[in-house]
Image (spheres, rainbow, N blue to C red):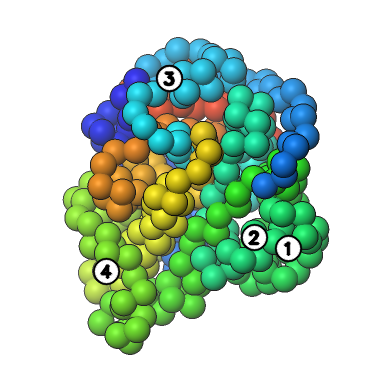
Amino acid sequence: MTAVGSGAGRRLGCRAAATGPRWLRGAAIALAAATLCACASTPMVVPEPPGLPDGIYSADGRALTLEQAVAEWESIPGDGPLVVYVSETHDNVAHHQVQAEILLALMRRFPARCALGMEMFPRPLQPLLDEFSAGGISAAELKERSDWDEIWGFDFSMYAPLLELVQLQGSALLALNAPKALTRKLAKVGPAGLSEEERDALPSTIDLPSDEHRAMIADVLRSVHEMDDATFERFYAAQRAWDSTMAQSVAEFLARGSDVRALVVIAGGYHIYGGLGIPRHVDAAVGHPVRRVIVIPVDTAERRFGPEDFQGADAGDYYVLSRGPTGGSHP
Protein backbone atom coordinates (compact mmCIF):
# COMPACT_ATOMS: atom_id res chain seq x y z
CA MET A 1 0.00 0.00 0.00
CA THR A 2 1.06 3.59 -0.41
CA ALA A 3 1.78 5.57 2.71
CA VAL A 4 -0.19 8.78 2.94
CA GLY A 5 2.89 10.92 3.40
CA SER A 6 4.52 9.60 0.24
CA GLY A 7 2.03 11.33 -2.02
CA ALA A 8 -1.32 9.64 -1.65
CA GLY A 9 -2.25 11.82 1.30
CA ARG A 10 -1.80 15.21 -0.29
CA ARG A 11 -5.23 15.74 -1.85
CA LEU A 12 -7.00 16.71 1.37
CA GLY A 13 -7.93 20.33 0.67
CA CYS A 14 -7.68 22.67 3.63
CA ARG A 15 -11.07 24.11 2.68
CA ALA A 16 -12.56 20.63 2.85
CA ALA A 17 -11.09 20.23 6.32
CA ALA A 18 -12.74 23.35 7.64
CA THR A 19 -16.07 23.16 5.81
CA GLY A 20 -16.40 19.53 4.74
CA PRO A 21 -17.61 16.40 6.56
CA ARG A 22 -18.47 16.87 10.23
CA TRP A 23 -15.85 14.33 11.29
CA LEU A 24 -13.21 16.73 9.95
CA ARG A 25 -14.94 19.98 10.92
CA GLY A 26 -15.05 19.11 14.61
CA ALA A 27 -11.31 18.59 14.70
CA ALA A 28 -10.76 21.83 12.81
CA ILE A 29 -12.67 23.80 15.46
CA ALA A 30 -10.78 21.95 18.18
CA LEU A 31 -7.38 22.67 16.74
CA ALA A 32 -8.15 26.38 16.67
CA ALA A 33 -9.42 26.31 20.25
CA ALA A 34 -6.46 24.31 21.51
CA THR A 35 -3.93 26.49 19.71
CA LEU A 36 -5.42 29.69 20.92
CA CYS A 37 -5.55 28.39 24.48
CA ALA A 38 -2.35 27.21 23.79
CA CYS A 39 7.65 -4.41 30.33
CA ALA A 40 6.22 -7.65 32.00
CA SER A 41 8.41 -10.80 31.58
CA THR A 42 5.34 -13.04 31.13
CA PRO A 43 2.68 -11.00 29.34
CA MET A 44 -0.93 -11.61 30.25
CA VAL A 45 -3.28 -12.87 27.54
CA VAL A 46 -5.05 -10.00 25.84
CA PRO A 47 -8.80 -10.55 25.38
CA GLU A 48 -10.56 -10.67 22.03
CA PRO A 49 -11.19 -7.20 20.56
CA PRO A 50 -14.81 -6.09 21.04
CA GLY A 51 -15.14 -5.33 17.33
CA LEU A 52 -16.15 -2.24 15.43
CA PRO A 53 -19.90 -2.21 14.79
CA ASP A 54 -19.78 0.16 11.84
CA GLY A 55 -16.74 -1.19 10.04
CA ILE A 56 -13.51 -0.04 8.47
CA TYR A 57 -12.94 1.45 5.04
CA SER A 58 -9.64 1.88 3.26
CA ALA A 59 -8.91 5.06 1.34
CA ASP A 60 -9.69 3.18 -1.87
CA GLY A 61 -13.16 2.31 -0.58
CA ARG A 62 -12.68 -1.32 0.49
CA ALA A 63 -14.59 -2.59 3.52
CA LEU A 64 -12.50 -4.62 5.98
CA THR A 65 -12.64 -6.17 9.41
CA LEU A 66 -10.20 -4.95 12.03
CA GLU A 67 -8.22 -8.18 11.76
CA GLN A 68 -7.96 -7.81 7.96
CA ALA A 69 -6.79 -4.22 8.36
CA VAL A 70 -4.11 -5.18 10.88
CA ALA A 71 -2.88 -7.92 8.52
CA GLU A 72 -2.56 -5.32 5.74
CA TRP A 73 -0.67 -2.97 8.03
CA GLU A 74 1.74 -5.74 9.00
CA SER A 75 2.52 -6.35 5.33
CA ILE A 76 3.68 -2.76 4.70
CA PRO A 77 7.24 -3.15 3.40
CA GLY A 78 10.29 -1.77 5.12
CA ASP A 79 12.45 -2.25 8.17
CA GLY A 80 11.74 -1.40 11.76
CA PRO A 81 8.54 -1.14 13.78
CA LEU A 82 5.25 -0.22 12.18
CA VAL A 83 4.08 3.22 13.34
CA VAL A 84 0.28 3.42 13.53
CA TYR A 85 -0.94 7.00 13.79
CA VAL A 86 -4.51 7.21 15.12
CA SER A 87 -6.12 10.63 15.21
CA GLU A 88 -8.74 11.87 17.62
CA THR A 89 -11.10 14.64 18.48
CA HIS A 90 -10.13 14.91 22.11
CA ASP A 91 -13.57 14.85 23.73
CA ASN A 92 -15.10 12.29 21.35
CA VAL A 93 -15.68 9.03 23.21
CA ALA A 94 -16.11 7.06 19.97
CA HIS A 95 -12.63 8.05 18.82
CA HIS A 96 -11.09 6.80 22.06
CA GLN A 97 -13.00 3.53 21.73
CA VAL A 98 -11.49 3.08 18.29
CA GLN A 99 -7.99 3.79 19.64
CA ALA A 100 -8.38 1.18 22.38
CA GLU A 101 -9.71 -1.39 19.93
CA ILE A 102 -6.80 -0.82 17.55
CA LEU A 103 -4.22 -1.06 20.34
CA LEU A 104 -5.91 -4.22 21.61
CA ALA A 105 -5.87 -5.82 18.15
CA LEU A 106 -2.18 -5.00 17.68
CA MET A 107 -1.35 -6.38 21.12
CA ARG A 108 -3.02 -9.63 20.15
CA ARG A 109 -0.99 -9.67 16.95
CA PHE A 110 2.27 -8.78 18.72
CA PRO A 111 1.98 -9.78 22.40
CA ALA A 112 4.28 -7.72 24.64
CA ARG A 113 5.77 -6.07 21.52
CA CYS A 114 3.61 -2.95 21.19
CA ALA A 115 4.21 0.57 22.49
CA LEU A 116 1.98 3.60 22.86
CA GLY A 117 2.95 7.25 22.31
CA MET A 118 0.59 9.95 23.62
CA GLU A 119 0.32 13.63 22.76
CA MET A 120 -1.27 14.14 26.17
CA PHE A 121 1.96 13.88 28.17
CA PRO A 122 4.92 16.30 27.86
CA ARG A 123 8.39 14.79 27.54
CA PRO A 124 9.60 15.72 31.05
CA LEU A 125 7.04 13.26 32.46
CA GLN A 126 8.72 10.24 30.82
CA PRO A 127 10.14 8.85 34.11
CA LEU A 128 6.65 8.91 35.61
CA LEU A 129 5.24 7.05 32.59
CA ASP A 130 8.02 4.46 32.90
CA GLU A 131 7.04 3.94 36.53
CA PHE A 132 3.41 3.45 35.52
CA SER A 133 4.25 1.00 32.71
CA ALA A 134 6.28 -1.09 35.12
CA GLY A 135 3.30 -1.36 37.46
CA GLY A 136 4.78 0.88 40.13
CA ILE A 137 1.78 3.20 40.32
CA SER A 138 -1.90 3.02 39.46
CA ALA A 139 -3.74 4.96 36.76
CA ALA A 140 -5.27 7.14 39.47
CA GLU A 141 -1.79 7.95 40.79
CA LEU A 142 -0.60 8.69 37.26
CA LYS A 143 -3.46 11.14 36.81
CA GLU A 144 -2.66 12.90 40.06
CA ARG A 145 1.12 12.99 39.79
CA SER A 146 1.11 14.11 36.14
CA ASP A 147 -1.23 16.99 37.02
CA TRP A 148 -3.48 15.73 34.23
CA ASP A 149 -6.17 18.35 34.65
CA GLU A 150 -3.58 21.08 34.09
CA ILE A 151 -1.45 19.52 31.33
CA TRP A 152 -4.38 18.10 29.35
CA GLY A 153 -7.77 18.67 30.94
CA PHE A 154 -9.94 16.27 28.94
CA ASP A 155 -11.77 13.46 30.75
CA PHE A 156 -9.12 11.02 31.99
CA SER A 157 -11.58 8.12 31.91
CA MET A 158 -11.63 8.23 28.09
CA TYR A 159 -7.89 7.44 28.04
CA ALA A 160 -7.93 4.95 30.93
CA PRO A 161 -8.56 1.84 28.76
CA LEU A 162 -5.45 2.63 26.68
CA LEU A 163 -3.35 3.10 29.80
CA GLU A 164 -4.67 -0.09 31.38
CA LEU A 165 -3.74 -2.07 28.27
CA VAL A 166 -0.22 -0.67 28.37
CA GLN A 167 0.25 -1.57 32.02
CA LEU A 168 -1.31 -4.99 31.48
CA GLN A 169 1.45 -5.87 29.02
CA GLY A 170 4.24 -3.83 30.58
CA SER A 171 4.50 -1.97 27.27
CA ALA A 172 6.48 1.20 26.67
CA LEU A 173 4.43 4.36 27.18
CA LEU A 174 5.92 7.46 25.56
CA ALA A 175 5.47 11.08 26.58
CA LEU A 176 5.57 12.81 23.20
CA ASN A 177 4.72 16.46 23.63
CA ALA A 178 6.52 19.72 24.26
CA PRO A 179 6.06 21.37 27.67
CA LYS A 180 2.87 23.41 27.71
CA ALA A 181 4.63 26.54 28.95
CA LEU A 182 6.92 26.53 25.91
CA THR A 183 4.17 26.23 23.29
CA ARG A 184 2.07 28.83 25.07
CA LYS A 185 5.00 31.23 25.03
CA LEU A 186 5.62 30.55 21.34
CA ALA A 187 1.99 31.32 20.53
CA LYS A 188 2.25 34.56 22.52
CA VAL A 189 5.64 35.98 21.49
CA GLY A 190 6.83 33.82 18.58
CA PRO A 191 10.31 32.27 18.18
CA ALA A 192 12.04 35.65 18.45
CA GLY A 193 10.67 36.07 21.97
CA LEU A 194 12.20 32.83 23.28
CA SER A 195 15.39 32.71 25.27
CA GLU A 196 18.44 31.10 23.69
CA GLU A 197 17.98 28.08 25.95
CA GLU A 198 14.33 27.74 24.89
CA ARG A 199 15.22 28.02 21.19
CA ASP A 200 17.94 25.38 21.60
CA ALA A 201 15.34 23.03 23.10
CA LEU A 202 13.27 23.08 19.91
CA PRO A 203 13.79 20.18 17.46
CA SER A 204 15.88 20.81 14.37
CA THR A 205 12.94 19.86 12.12
CA ILE A 206 10.69 22.65 13.43
CA ASP A 207 11.33 24.74 10.31
CA LEU A 208 10.73 21.84 7.89
CA PRO A 209 8.88 23.64 5.07
CA SER A 210 5.48 22.56 3.75
CA ASP A 211 3.16 24.87 1.85
CA GLU A 212 0.39 22.29 2.17
CA HIS A 213 0.70 22.10 5.95
CA ARG A 214 0.83 25.88 6.30
CA ALA A 215 -2.26 26.29 4.10
CA MET A 216 -4.17 23.60 6.00
CA ILE A 217 -3.45 25.12 9.43
CA ALA A 218 -4.10 28.67 8.20
CA ASP A 219 -7.45 27.65 6.79
CA VAL A 220 -8.43 25.87 10.01
CA LEU A 221 -7.42 28.70 12.34
CA ARG A 222 -8.84 31.48 10.21
CA SER A 223 -12.12 29.64 9.72
CA VAL A 224 -12.71 29.97 13.45
CA HIS A 225 -10.85 33.13 14.49
CA GLU A 226 -9.92 36.34 12.74
CA MET A 227 -6.17 36.93 12.94
CA ASP A 228 -3.59 39.03 11.18
CA ASP A 229 -0.49 37.51 9.58
CA ALA A 230 1.76 38.17 12.58
CA THR A 231 -0.67 36.45 14.95
CA PHE A 232 -0.99 33.48 12.62
CA GLU A 233 2.79 33.11 12.38
CA ARG A 234 3.06 32.89 16.18
CA PHE A 235 0.34 30.26 16.41
CA TYR A 236 1.81 28.37 13.47
CA ALA A 237 5.18 28.31 15.26
CA ALA A 238 3.47 26.68 18.25
CA GLN A 239 1.83 24.12 15.95
CA ARG A 240 5.19 23.27 14.40
CA ALA A 241 6.72 22.96 17.86
CA TRP A 242 4.05 20.45 18.83
CA ASP A 243 4.47 18.42 15.65
CA SER A 244 8.27 18.44 15.59
CA THR A 245 8.64 17.68 19.31
CA MET A 246 6.26 14.74 19.14
CA ALA A 247 8.08 13.53 16.04
CA GLN A 248 11.42 13.82 17.81
CA SER A 249 10.07 11.64 20.63
CA VAL A 250 8.95 9.00 18.12
CA ALA A 251 12.25 9.16 16.21
CA GLU A 252 14.31 8.78 19.39
CA PHE A 253 12.30 5.73 20.39
CA LEU A 254 12.78 4.14 16.97
CA ALA A 255 16.51 4.90 17.05
CA ARG A 256 17.01 3.19 20.42
CA GLY A 257 16.06 -0.16 18.92
CA SER A 258 13.90 -2.74 20.66
CA ASP A 259 11.78 -5.77 19.95
CA VAL A 260 8.69 -3.56 19.54
CA ARG A 261 6.79 -4.46 16.38
CA ALA A 262 4.15 -1.71 16.48
CA LEU A 263 4.12 1.79 17.94
CA VAL A 264 0.68 3.38 18.20
CA VAL A 265 0.75 7.20 18.24
CA ILE A 266 -2.40 9.02 19.33
CA ALA A 267 -2.81 12.74 18.75
CA GLY A 268 -5.29 15.32 17.57
CA GLY A 269 -6.30 15.10 13.94
CA TYR A 270 -4.39 18.11 12.62
CA HIS A 271 -1.15 16.69 13.96
CA ILE A 272 -1.75 13.63 11.75
CA TYR A 273 -4.04 14.36 8.77
CA GLY A 274 -2.46 13.72 5.42
CA GLY A 275 0.85 12.85 7.04
CA LEU A 276 1.64 16.56 7.06
CA GLY A 277 2.28 16.99 10.80
CA ILE A 278 3.96 14.43 13.04
CA PRO A 279 4.49 11.75 10.34
CA ARG A 280 6.35 14.14 8.02
CA HIS A 281 8.59 15.32 10.85
CA VAL A 282 9.32 11.74 11.92
CA ASP A 283 10.54 10.86 8.44
CA ALA A 284 12.76 13.95 8.44
CA ALA A 285 14.16 13.22 11.90
CA VAL A 286 14.86 9.56 11.08
CA GLY A 287 16.26 10.39 7.66
CA HIS A 288 14.00 8.12 5.63
CA PRO A 289 10.31 7.17 5.39
CA VAL A 290 9.29 4.86 8.22
CA ARG A 291 6.76 2.04 7.94
CA ARG A 292 3.53 3.72 8.83
CA VAL A 293 -0.23 3.80 8.47
CA ILE A 294 -2.60 6.66 9.26
CA VAL A 295 -5.95 5.71 10.79
CA ILE A 296 -8.85 8.17 11.18
CA PRO A 297 -11.70 7.32 13.59
CA VAL A 298 -15.14 8.43 12.39
CA ASP A 299 -18.07 8.80 14.80
CA THR A 300 -21.24 7.46 13.16
CA ALA A 301 -23.63 8.71 15.86
CA GLU A 302 -25.20 11.29 13.54
CA ARG A 303 -25.34 9.51 10.19
CA ARG A 304 -24.29 6.43 8.27
CA PHE A 305 -21.23 6.32 6.04
CA GLY A 306 -20.45 4.18 3.01
CA PRO A 307 -17.46 3.44 0.74
CA GLU A 308 -18.24 6.47 -1.39
CA ASP A 309 -17.51 8.74 1.58
CA PHE A 310 -13.90 7.59 1.76
CA GLN A 311 -12.81 6.80 -1.79
CA GLY A 312 -9.99 9.19 -2.57
CA ALA A 313 -10.07 10.76 0.90
CA ASP A 314 -6.58 11.82 1.89
CA ALA A 315 -6.71 12.48 5.61
CA GLY A 316 -5.64 8.89 6.21
CA ASP A 317 -5.12 5.40 4.84
CA TYR A 318 -7.99 3.81 6.79
CA TYR A 319 -11.20 5.13 8.33
CA VAL A 320 -12.59 3.27 11.34
CA LEU A 321 -16.28 3.81 12.02
CA SER A 322 -17.65 3.60 15.54
CA ARG A 323 -20.79 4.82 17.25
CA GLY A 324 -20.01 6.61 20.51
CA PRO A 325 -22.42 7.87 23.16
CA THR A 326 -21.55 11.47 22.26
CA GLY A 327 -19.99 13.36 19.37
CA GLY A 328 -17.28 15.82 20.33
CA SER A 329 -16.39 19.10 18.75
CA HIS A 330 -12.86 19.65 20.06
CA PRO A 331 -9.79 17.65 19.05
In the picture, measured across the screen, residue 302 lies left or right of residue 204, that is right
Q: Residues within 10 Å of mark 1 (few under 14, many from 20)?
A: some
Determine whether label 1 and label 2 are within 8 Å by CB. Answer: yes
Q: Nearer the viewer, mark 4 or mark 3?
A: 3
Residue 21 lies left or right of residue 116; in this view the side is left
Q: Secondary structure at mark 2?
A: helix
Q: Earlier in the sequence, mark 3 or mark 1?
A: 3
Residue 105 visible in image? no
Q: Name the residue: 64% across, 41% down.
A: 96
Instruction: Identify the residue at image location x=50%, y=58%.
Output: 176
Q: Mark 4, residues whose alpha carbon is within 10 Å: few (<14), some, or many (≥20)?
A: some
Identify the residue position indicated by label 1 in the image. 142
Residue at x 38% of width, y 57% of height: 248
Q: Which mark is residue 233?
A: 4
The residue where tag 2 is placed is 129
Helix, strand or loop for disc 1: helix
Up-down relation of residue 163 to residue 312 (above or below): below
Of 243 and 90, the residue lying toward us: 243
Residue matched to label 3: 75
Where does the N terminus fall, quadrant-wise? top left
Point 25% across, 33% down: residue: 6
Neighbours of disc 3 within 10 Å: few (<14), some (14-19), many (20+): few
1 vs 2, front mark: 2
Looking at the picture, which amino acid does disc 1 mark?
Leu
Q: Secondary structure at mark 4?
A: helix
Residue 142 placement: quadrant: bottom right
- Which mark lies nearer to you, 1 or 4? 1
Disc 3 marks a residue whose amino acid type is Ser
Please tell me whether residue 64 is drawn above or below residue 331 in the rendered image. Answer: above
Q: In the rendered structure, which amino acid carries the disc numbered 2?
A: Leu
